[in-house]
Image: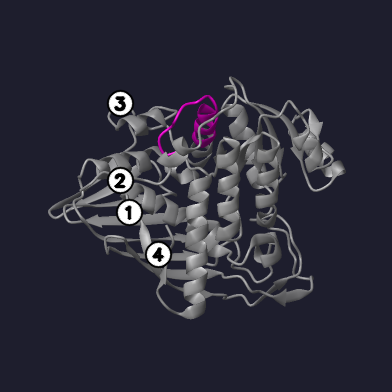
């Protein structure tokens, strides 16, 4: 079969026209769980984290102290006017992403923006155009691409090990919103956008499967479900265990679960189940690629191995940089038998982002164009669920 084209190689369409940056200086917008991951990864990738912006000037100063960062900014303008800052990492609620990323690009800053980069495809397109016009790097943390065994699988797909695809299927399941008293800003469409479960985690599944299998989803048929119809009227961090049982409850309009059927441009059937209310499932991104000659399974909670199936046998392939393919070995930060996982994925993603700032073109680096692709999928899934009909996916 043909080698997977992937849609991130288009990073080369946005050449860097600014001086190369040997040691990036970074500001982080946001102070939640994912912002802490960005700070850790930026430092591991050799950057200087010079400042952080939280929800208030007081909170910014407190977080800067806790994270051992020099500056707690009072507002976004202070970040963008800081000439020391080369790269802005945007880790704020979803509705802020487009404006903050656009303003950072117009201020001459490179951008790492959490997904979704926008809560509509039109806004995502505008942001991608802004990055292209500015000649700046803008990347999106689809970090599951950075598991070494994901790279191993993609290389084997490119080598034709699986034959023509018969079926692509899987799920992404979490349980952090199973309790009716659980909530966060993500539940509110004004802050999180019109899609929750699909935009938040289903987007990762589809990005990964399209990129690894070398396919493009052409149309979808989707159904959404809101299984907890009321939640506390309170924001807060994702994955929080604090009790909000005494808060006023309000109707929930974003989805807890989604079922999606799809067809690729080659007519291959795709199916995925996405849920944030599946008890016991903490972060289970799982997919199976079934080809005419062989099948493969990757499970994000067991990232050190691949399951491979053949007509007369099965085998488990483990991460080992001495025998894995080049990209898998490149992303292996420790020897075989020394487990690595999500944090190392994030570190490798940020390293590749900073390499792009130096004029390099790392394989598989997810850019704002991949964020745009994801926005098209989100819009198509919501439209399909609303119309209860097959819906084309642009691009």
Left or right of 38 on screen, residue 11: left
Q: Quadrant of residue 362?
A: top left
User: Can residue 116 be seen by looking at this rendering?
Assistant: no
- Mark 1–mark 2 distance (CA, rounded to whole Å): 7 Å
Identified at 58% across, 28% down, the residue is 44
Q: Earlier in the sequence, mark 2 or mark 4?
A: 2
Q: How many marks?
A: 4
Q: Which residue reaches farthest left?
A: 312
Q: Quadrant of residue 161?
A: top left
Residue 14: image x %, image y %? 50, 37
Q: From the viewer's perspective, is residue 37 above or below residue 265?
A: above
- Mark 3–mark 4 distance (CA, rounded to whole Å): 34 Å
Q: From the viewer's perspective, is residue 229 above or below residue 209?
A: below
Q: Earlier in the sequence, mark 1 or mark 2?
A: 2
Q: Check disc 2: other Cα within 10 Å, few if <14, some if 14-19, many if 20+.
A: some
Residue of label 2: 4
Q: Check disc 3: other Cα within 10 Å, few if <14, some if 14-19, many if 20+.
A: few
Q: Which residue reaches farthest top?
A: 22
Q: Earlier in the sequence, mark 3 or mark 2?
A: 2
Q: For the residue labelled by badge 2, is the local secondary structure a helix, a strand or a loop?
A: loop
Decide which of 316, 366 is in the foreground and name it: 366
Q: Which mark is residue 322?
A: 3
Q: Check disc 4: other Cα within 10 Å, few if <14, some if 14-19, many if 20+.
A: many
Residue of label 4: 272
Q: Earlier in the sequence, mark 4 or mark 1?
A: 1
2 or 4: mark nearer the eye:
2
Residue 181: image x %, image y %? 69, 69
| Circles 1 and 3: CB atoms closer than 8 Å | no
Residue 127 belongs to the span the image colors magenta:
no
Q: Which residues are magenta?
A: 348-364
Residue of label 1: 215
Identified at 37% across, 53% down, the residue is 209
């Amino acid at each position: 079969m043909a080698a997977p084209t992937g849609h991130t190689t288009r990073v080369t369409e946005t050449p860097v026209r600014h001086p190369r940056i040997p040691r990036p200086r970074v500001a982080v917008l946001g102070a939640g769980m994912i912002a802490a991951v960005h700070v850790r990864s930026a430092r591991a990738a050799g950057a200087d984290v010079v400042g952080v912006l939280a929800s208030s000037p007081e909170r910014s100063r407190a977080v800067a102290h806790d994270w051992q960062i020099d500056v707690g900014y009072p507002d976004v303008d202070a970040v963008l006017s800081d000439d020391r800052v080369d790269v802005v990492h945007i880790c704020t609620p979803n509705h802020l992403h487009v404006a903050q990323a656009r303003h950072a690009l117009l201020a001459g800053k490179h951008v790492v923006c959490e997904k979704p980069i926008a809560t509509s495809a039109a806004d995502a397109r505008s942001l991608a155009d802004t990055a292209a016009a500015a000649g700046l790097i803008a990347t999106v943390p689809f970090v599951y691409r950075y598991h070494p065994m994901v790279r191993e699988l993609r290389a084997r797909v490119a080598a034709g090990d699986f034959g023509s695809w018969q079926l692509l299927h899987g799920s992404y399941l979490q349980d952090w919103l199973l309790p009716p008293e659980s909530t966060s800003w993500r539940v509110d469409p004004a802050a999180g956008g019109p899609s929750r479960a699909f935009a938040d985690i289903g987007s990762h599944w589809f990005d990964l499967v399209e990129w690894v299998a070398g396919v493009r989803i052409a149309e979808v048929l989707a159904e959404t479900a809101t299984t907890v119809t009321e939640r506390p009227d309170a924001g807060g961090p994702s994955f929080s265990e604090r009790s909000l049982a005494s808060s006023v409850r309000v109707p929930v309009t974003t989805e807890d679960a989604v079922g999606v059927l799809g067809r690729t441009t080659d007519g291959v059937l795709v199916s995925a189940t996405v849920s944030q209310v599946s008890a016991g499932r903490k972060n289970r991104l799982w997919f199976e690629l079934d080809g005419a000659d062989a099948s493969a399974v990757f499970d994000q909670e067991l990232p050190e191995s691949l399951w491979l199936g053949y007509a007369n046998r099965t085998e488990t392939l483990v991460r080992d940089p001495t025998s894995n393919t080049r990209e898998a070995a490149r992303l292996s930060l420790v020897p075989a038998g020394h487990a690595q996982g999500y944090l190392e994925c994030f570190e490798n993603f940020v390293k590749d982002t900073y390499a792009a700032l130096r004029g390099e073109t790392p394989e598989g680096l997810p850019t704002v164009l991949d964020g745009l692709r994801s926005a098209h999928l989100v819009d198509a899934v919501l439209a399909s669920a609303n119309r209860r009909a097959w819906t084309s996916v642009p691009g």
